[in-house]
Image: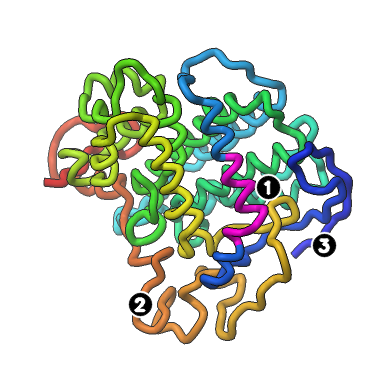
Amino acid sequence: MAEPTETTASTTDSQSPTTNMYFPPRKVILTKENLEAFQQSETHATIVSYINTLNECVVGVKLTDDVPVSTNVQAVLGLLDKVEETAKSIPPVDNKASRFGNPAFRTFYDKVAEFAPALHKSIPGMTEAAIPEVSVYFEESWGNRTRIDYGSGMELNFLCWMICLEKLGVFQESDHVALVIKVFWRYIQIMRTLQSTYWLEPAGSHGVWGLDDYHFLPFLWGSAQLRGHKYIRPKSIHDSDTVEEFSKHYMYLACIQFINSVKTASLRWHSPMLDDISAVKTWDKVNSGLIKMYHVEVLGKLPVMQHFLFGSILAWNGPLPAPPRGAPGPDDAHWGHAHALNERGGVGQLQNGWGDCCGIPVPSAFAAAQAEAGKKPGARLAGPAIRPVPFD
């Protein structure tokens, strides 16, 4: 671990003290007791408050609306463009023997990690001493290098990256709308490219608690966009014409369209949770319900939060808990996992069971689509290796 750097950073009223000891963030949560302590912490309150603040900022706002984009937000969008360019320059390797994550993702990950510090230096107003800390959240936003998977915990890393930049004074309150419909949505678009190109596996046996195998926040903030809409109702996700026409305006419908482009049959079969949500009468209730669900199923789940990274900006309150006896070291693929603390019956196993965070590896829908493409003739849908997957 790099030596902490003492520096002075600009702050707002809601931020941490002006003098910070910056250091690369690390995992802390290993037990249920650690998780309970986190849920009572200032960092937890900061994350919840930020989600709620951005949520209220985008009520009634369309993705296509002309919103102010500050110089700093524009610089961050340029940084994200660089990530997408990198992915497009690193094609997947020939991996026909496997339907799991493509090893070329590791090359992509390493390349992003290599240029991330330099890109952060190019952001106006960035505190240089904080870059080793902040860039870790950025690097871990794209998926797990070892397991070649992605889930709501990685999405949370991107949210934490935005929080850190705001605490450092890079983003201002006036940027909040643009942070959701420009920066965050750009991130989701890049993730779709990575998921379809490198066949990122859903993290955990069931894609953890992402509503579409991978994501949660675009549904949460997307439902906020639709609050009070005169015509579109939650049940409208079953109307293909409505989804097609309005997906360019609303994140929630864009996510439904994405699911429909990869999977066939009714949502009832392959996305039962989204199908259940569509029965709710109003978007206000959908939105409030998803916020509560995020608190419980993401911020309140040990298999997700055992991967959470604490630094000086998003800090762990109190002394660091000692790793339990038998815990794997930082070079182990399951380092920091709650299920990997005692004698293991195999890689990633505790006695005879698998941890929910890792589970039995599940191929991505894109890998299944490719396998199906080899069985049936017909034109492929747009996007790398995308073809509808039959579920009936």
Q: Is residue 150 left or right of residue 336?
A: left
Q: Give how far across and how far down residue 169 sits, in percent.
A: 77, 35
On the image, numbered disc 2 is attached to which residue? 353
Q: Which tag, 3 or 2, sits closer to the chain's start?
A: 3
**Residue 148: which quarter of the image?**
bottom left
Residue sitting nearer the eye, 384 or 342: 342
On the image, numbered disc 1 is attached to which residue? 135
Q: Give how far across and how far down residue 278 sits, in percent.
A: 26, 35
Q: Is residue 263 visible?
A: yes
Principal secondary structure, stretch drawn in magenta: helix
Magenta span includes 45: yes
Q: Quadrant of the N terminus?
A: bottom right
Q: Which tag, 2 or 1, sits closer to the chain's start?
A: 1
Name the residue rendered at 66%, 58% in the picture. 310
At label 3, the amino acid type is Glu
- Magenta span: 38-50
Mark 3 is surrounded, within 10 Å at the Cα level, by few (under 14), some (14 to 19) or many (20 or more) other residues, namely few
Name the residue rendered at 58%, 34% in the picture. 53
Per the image, label 1 sits on a secondary structure element best described as helix
Per the image, label 3 sits on a secondary structure element best described as loop
